[in-house]
Image: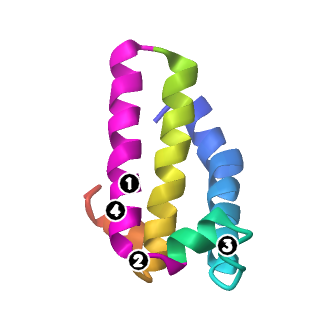
């Protein structure tokens, strides 16, 4: 992994993911009328599954168009919805990190 990538992961991306995971967890108790995240967490799982699939498709289509800004935008949407799914299914960041580490051996 290059130095630029390592610095971003250790700093901005790692901290941002921690904040995102924490914020989404806190939104579980928010009013679904006031919070999109709370609506996703309180609503039917099928709706969240469809959002993850939709965002994955939009990410792939953006990649096919080779539009850097659009790819980044769609990746952020996909990552957000994946973290909401993590919260909905009670998968912790530690569990996911362990799964990823196990695949790097």
Q: Are marks 1 and 4 in contact (CB under 8 Å)?
A: yes
Calculate the distance from the C-alpha at mark 2 to the C-alpha at mark 1. 20 Å
Q: Which residue is drawn at 44% across and 59% down?
A: 82
User: Residue 71, how many percent across, how many down?
Assistant: 48, 27
Q: Do the residues labelled 2 and 1 touch (CB within 8 Å)?
A: no
Q: Quadrant of residue 66?
A: top left
Secondary structure type for disc 1: helix
User: Residue 98, how many percent across, how many down?
Assistant: 38, 72
Q: Are marks 4 and 3 in contact (CB under 8 Å)?
A: no
Tell me if residue 2 comes above or below residue 46 in the rendering: above
User: Which quadrant is home to the C terminus?
Assistant: bottom left
Secondary structure type for disc 3: helix
Residue located beneath label 3 in the image:
22
Give whichever of 102, 68 is nearer the camera: 68
Give whichever of 74, 32 is nearer the camera: 32
Residue located beneath label 4 in the image:
49
Numbered range of the magenta stretch = 42-66
Q: Do the residues labelled 4 and 2 touch (CB within 8 Å)?
A: no
Secondary structure type for disc 4: helix
- Numbered disc in front, either 3 or 2: 3
Q: Which of marks 4 and 2 is nearer the N terminus?
A: 4
Residue located beneath label 2 in the image:
95
Q: Earlier in the sequence, mark 4 or mark 3?
A: 3
Give whichever of 66, 11 is nearer the camera: 66
Calculate the distance from the C-alpha at mark 4 to the C-alpha at mark 3. 21 Å
Tell me if residue 42 comes above or below residue 12 in the rendering: below
Q: Residue at x 49, y 39 (%)?
A: 75
């Amino acid at each position: 992994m290059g130095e630029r990538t390592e610095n971003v992961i250790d700093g901005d991306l790692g901290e941002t993911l921690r904040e995102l995971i924490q914020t989404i967890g806190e939104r579980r108790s928010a009013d679904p009328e006031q919070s999109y995240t709370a609506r996703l967490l309180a609503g039917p799982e099928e709706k969240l599954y469809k959002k993850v699939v939709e965002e994955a498709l939009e990410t792939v289509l953006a990649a096919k168009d080779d539009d850097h800004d659009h790819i980044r935008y769609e990746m952020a949407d996909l990552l957000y919805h994946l973290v909401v799914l993590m919260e909905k299914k009670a998968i912790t960041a530690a569990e996911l990190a362990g799964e990823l580490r196990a695949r790097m051996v």
